Amino acid sequence: MAAVKACKILITGANRGLGLEMVKQLSEHSCQKHHIFATCRDPDGQKSETLRELVKKHPSVITIIRLDADDPCSIKESAKKVGSLVGKNGLNLLVNNAGIVANGTILTSRVEDMKNTFNTNVIGPLLIIREYLPILQTAAKASGTPGMSCNKAAVINISTVAGSMTRMPTIYNQFPTLPYAVSKAGFNMLTVLAAEELKANEILCMALHPGWVKTELGGEEAALEPKESVEGMLRVIGSLTEKQHGGFLDYTGETVTW
Ligand code: NDP
């Protein structure tokens, strides 16, 4: 099962889909010091009901925090709150999972969809990494161990093969999602550049493709159940070392070409 031993974990978009499944699996197999900050944009809303139920089952393990990736103020506020809760141990693992999809081609993509996908899928994670960097640095320093791992300090960006220059052309007919693909290609570049900057702090940073999964975003036709995808992703996350820093893997641990 989940080999993730990181103590303090934050997941964005944790109220449904893959984010929620990640919180569920981590809380069910939690080690004693585990704490999960499950973030979502509307903690009291209807879409967060399942997450609130999960918190009732594991009240000492999960804390819900408001974070809207489209709202820089909410990102800043969330980082302040989480910072005060983690204290001197810092945040070990940040999972940038929140994302949106939009369909379109060269001829049909709407400008609004291009802007919205870029906002949520690129600018949001950029600001999140920036605002959470001080507490990731704290965790890296506090660990006292050399090298990189998600148990020390890590940023995991949940990306997609749709953002791969080499893979997307082969599936574009089946998935004409130009705004999404372009934004996720930007997210991939963000991962590579963040990895470059975070190297000096020994904070691991990489991109992870969850597979094609049955969620609202993935649709009913998808190949995988969230359970299988998340089990795989947690296995991969738990096994990461500096060798995968700046890399792109899928939920089985296979390398994805950029
Ligand atoms: P879902 O649509 O099921 O869930 C998306 C999550 O992101 C929801 O929690 C949603 O919250 C949240 N979210 C959307 N916009 C924002 C925002 N502005 N601020 C904060 N949270 C936001 O998608 P998945 O679970 O399938 O996708 C999770 C990640 O996995 C995405 O990054 C996606 O690109 C990636 N992925 C998924 C694949 C799949 O087949 N499912 C394939 C490849 C990659 P709310 O309820 O408020 O809308």
Image: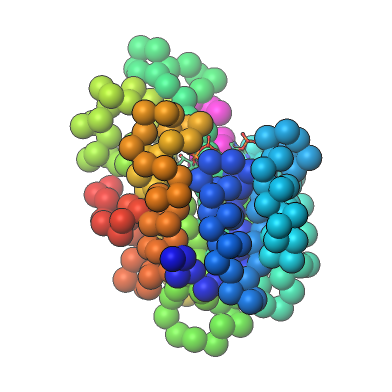
| Residue sitting at x 56%, y 35% | 119
- Residue 118: within the magenta? yes
Q: Nearer the viewer, residue 17 or 207?
A: 17
Q: In the rendered view, would you say 160 is above or below 1?
A: above
Residue 124 visible in rendering = no
Q: In the rendered view, would you say 83 is above or below 13?
A: below
Place of residue 32 in the rendered image (x, y in percent of width and height, measured from the top left) = 63, 76
- Residue 239: within the magenta? no
From the viewer's perspective, tell me whether residue 180 is left or right of residue 60. left
Q: How many marks?
A: 0
| Residue sitting at x 63%, y 43% | 15
Residue 7 position by quadrant: bottom right
Residue 98 position by quadrant: top right
From the viewer's perspective, tell me whether residue 2 is left or right of residue 8. left
Report the predominant secondary structure element of the magenta stretch. Answer: helix
Place of residue 238 in the rendered image (x, y in percent of width and height, measured from the top left) = 43, 68
Q: In the rendered view, would you say 46 is above or below 89?
A: above
Q: Nearer the viewer, residue 14 or 119?
A: 14
Place of residue 56 in the rendered image (x, y in percent of width and height, measured from the top left) = 75, 54
Q: What colouring does the structure picture have?
A: rainbow
Outermost top residue: 107
Outermost bottom residue: 144
Write the start and end of the magenta stretch as one range. 114-123
Which quadrant holds the N terminus? bottom left
| Residue sitting at x 34%, y 22% | 176
Residue 46 visible in rendering = yes
| Residue sitting at x 43%, y 75% | 148
Place of residue 10 in the rendered image (x, y in percent of width and height, measured from the top left) = 61, 59
